Image (cartoon, grey):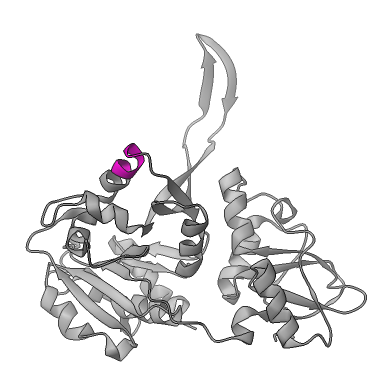
Amino acid sequence: MFNDISDVRVGPKQTVRDAIEIIDANRKQIALVVDDRDQLLGVVADGDIRRGMLRGATLDAPITEIMTASPKVARQGQSAAAILEMMSEFEIRHVPVVDPDGVVTGLFTVDDLRQPVESTTPVVLMAGGRGQRLYPLTKETPKPMLSIGDSPLLSIILTNLRSQGFVNVFISVNYLADVITNYVGDGSRFGLRVTYVHEDKPLGTAGALGSLAGVISEPFIVMNSDLLTHVNLREMLSFHAKRDAKGTIGVREHVFEIPYGVVNLDGAVVESMIEKPFHRSLVNAGIYALDPLALDLLVKGEYMDMPTLLGQLIEGGHDVTAFPIHESWLDVGRPEDLNLARSESDKWKNP
């Protein structure tokens, strides 16, 4: 149990953005909303944030707008077995411990009470691209093998997968494939079983999956291999399964400022004017959960990009859902992104 809640504490006047920063920093996937006496007012877990984003809540909304106001709690002295049973019954991963006055004295997480179970779920890493935007750095080094601190990007990704319990990994390779295969080998150095999918030519962001039809028989994760993120992929798979989706797209909120005053019209009549407004959109984060059904839509050796594949699922009457990713995330695709990743290399080390 964690007795010091200083790194999970958030005040009721703070914002969703503040809670996300606290959750990303503490890596426990929860923030406790408390008053100035540490009396528990509510909790904010990953699911609360994702549901809030899907409802349209902005990151600057008050934390009280999305928090769970009556969370399940444990009392001091309650047994670990009883707490674990509560977690299982209500499908929760965190239980604050409170005293008779409702003051938080600690926090249990499911990982405190049981060891993570290995997952047979396959993860497919797309690592065949040429990394042209990072040339000449990628002239002799494939993008996934560029260093972030003292480790290649791909090493950070693989270590993170293993820490989440994944053991079966497929890596799609093409450009400078030998550099990747020589480094990763069979994956045993990472505690993984790695199988390679060799592309004879670039097949797009989904085409290489055509070789896995009949090989993968359960829902699986597909992830670009130039991403750094702390997202919990098992939570994404659970989200995917609960909604009976055939495809799920990880999405991020992207905000940009329009550098001009925007004029809204009704015909030629000005209805309103907004000075330099912010525009918010959910954008593709390069992480997907797919059912094996998707593999049947691919032809081995033929080009296919992921939006086209997901579009075909939708056209076939299948549900494709969006999984909001609020955790730290960085697409290392441009020189400035690579420089940022390197300047924050300690942030991406696995706990």
> Where on the picture, by quarter, is residue 229?
bottom left
The residue furthest left is 200
Disc tally is 0
> Where on the picture, by quarter, is residue 126?
bottom left
236 relative to 321, above or below: below
User: Does residue 35 appear to the left or right of 49 in the view shown?
Assistant: right
Which residue is found at the position 54% from the left and 36% from the top?
Answer: 277
Q: Which of 210/99 is in front? A: 210
Which residue is found at the position 41% from the left and 53% from the top?
Answer: 248
Q: Which of 101/84 is in front? A: 84
Residue 3 image point, x, y percent: 74, 86
Which residue is found at the position 83% from the left and 73% from the top?
Answer: 38
Could you tell me if residue 249 is visible in this image? yes
Q: Is residue 312 magenta?
A: yes
Residue 118 image point, x, y percent: 44, 81
User: Does residue 253 appear to the left or right of 4 in the view shown?
Assistant: left
The residue furthest right is 101
318 relative to 214, above or below: above
Secondary structure mostly seen in magenta is: helix
The residue furthest top is 268
Q: Which of 5/74 is in front? A: 74
Magenta segment boundaries in residue numbering? 311-316
Could you tell me if residue 4 is visible in this image? no
Which residue is found at the position 52% from the left and 57% from the top?
Answer: 242
Residue 133 image point, x, y percent: 21, 58
**What is the quadrant of the N terminus in the image?**
bottom right
Residue 331 image point, x, y percent: 35, 61
